[in-house]
Image (cartoon, helix red, strand yellow):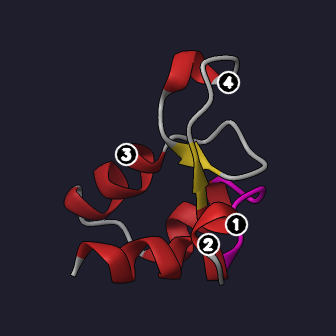
Amino acid sequence: MEKGQVVSCDSEVMGGTLVFSGTRVPVHTLVDYLEAGHSLDDFLDGFSSVSRDQASAYLETML
């Protein structure tokens, strides 16, 4: 998955907050979920506009 398909930053979307591409879901929401002890599946259940591939690709960049 290419970087542009994973996340985007646009001043017209969520005030320039880094979001998962094609959504209005900030990437920090995923981090917050995981830090709180929730699973990736919990996050994906709550934010169905984010694909598993997007979330996994983003997490790989954090390692």
Say which of marks 2 and 1 sits in front.
1
Splitting the image into 4 quarters, where does residue 13 fall?
top right
- Residue at (50% x, 81% y) in the render: 56
Camera-side residue of 36 and 23 = 23
The answer to whether the residue labelled 2 contacts the one labelled 1, judged by CB atoms less than 8 Å apart, is yes
**Position in image of residue 28 (x %, y %):** 37, 45
From this view, report whether residue 60 is shown above or below residue 55: below
- Residue at (24% x, 66% y) in the render: 37
> In this image, 7 relative to 17: left or right?
right
**Label 3 crowding class (10 Å Cα cut-off): few <14, some 14-19, many 20+?**
few
Q: Kindly report the distance in space between the C-alpha atoms of the residues bearing marks 3 and 2.
A: 13 Å
Is residue 48 magenta-colored? yes
Checking the image for residue 57, the label placed there is none
Residue type, label 4: Val
> What stretch of residues is rendered in magenta?
47-52
Q: Main secondary structure of the magenta part?
A: loop
Name the N-terminal-most of marks 1 and 3. Answer: 1
Checking the image for residue 28, the label placed there is 3
Residue type, label 2: Gln
The answer to whether the residue labelled 1 contacts the one labelled 4, judged by CB atoms less than 8 Å apart, is no
**Label 2 crowding class (10 Å Cα cut-off): few <14, some 14-19, many 20+?**
some
Residue type, label 3: His
Checking the image for residue 54, the label placed there is 2
- Residue at (32% x, 56% y) in the render: 31
The residue at which mark 4 appears reads as 13
The residue at which mark 1 appears reads as 5
**Label 4 crowding class (10 Å Cα cut-off): few <14, some 14-19, many 20+?**
some
